[in-house]
Amino acid sequence: MVDELTSRGESPELIALLTPTLEMTREQWDRIQAEEGPPIGTSVETLEAWEYVVQLPQSNPYELGSADGEQFDAMRLAIRDVRARFSIERGGPDPAAAREAGDL
């Protein structure tokens, strides 16, 4: 349902690991937003009754200056980059299928 999200030529699979995307109804998003505590993510798109939320890494889990740490930093996207690259395939999820699956 969510089209590929890429950065600087890395594969969509690698970027997807760093930017998990949640699909939920606007009602669900509003309810989550009203809860106390840190936000679960940042909304990047609204389409009809659906809200698309990404979860960006809060910090680099690797040792500062290590090869893994540098690679992680190079692959991280800012929210503005995610929004610029984000698109939705075929108009988003099918509400009937979501109801049948128990997602609504």
Image (cartoon, grey):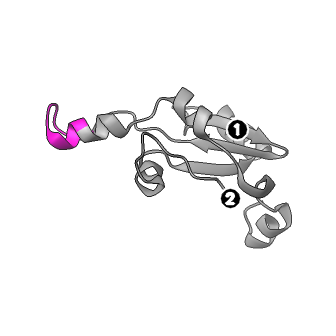
Residue 48 vs residue 10, the one in the foreground: 10
Task: Tell me whether the residue at label 2 lies in contact with that at label 1, contact meaning CB atoms closer than 8 angstroms.
Answer: no
Q: Is mark 2 on a helix, strand or loop?
A: loop
Q: Which residue is drawn at 48% across and 53% down?
A: 12
Label 1, residues with CA under 10 Å away: few <14, some 14-19, many ≥20? some
Residue 23 to residue 31: above or below: below
Mark on residue 45? 1
Residue 4: image x %, image y %? 57, 52
- Left or right of 46 on screen, residue 32: left
Which mark identifies residue 82? none
Question: Looking at the image, is 35 positioned above or below residue 97?
Answer: above
Amino acid at circle 2: Met
Residue 92 in picture, x, y percent from top left: 76, 54
Q: Which quadrant, please, contains the N terminus?
A: bottom right
In the picture of the structure, the residue carrying the numbered disc 2 is 1
Q: Does the magenta stretch include residue 65?
A: yes
| Label 2 packing within 10 angstroms: few (<14), some (14-19), many (20+) | few
Q: Quadrant of the C terminus?
A: bottom right
Q: Residue at x 81, y 66 (%)?
A: 99
Q: What stretch is highlighted in magenta?
A: 61-70
- What main secondary structure does the magenta stretch of the protein show? loop
Residue at 22% over, 38% down: 69
Residue 50 at least partly seen:
yes
- Mark 1 element type: strand
Residue 30 within the segment the image draws in magenta: no
> In the rendered image of this protein, does residue 5 appear above or below residue 38?
below
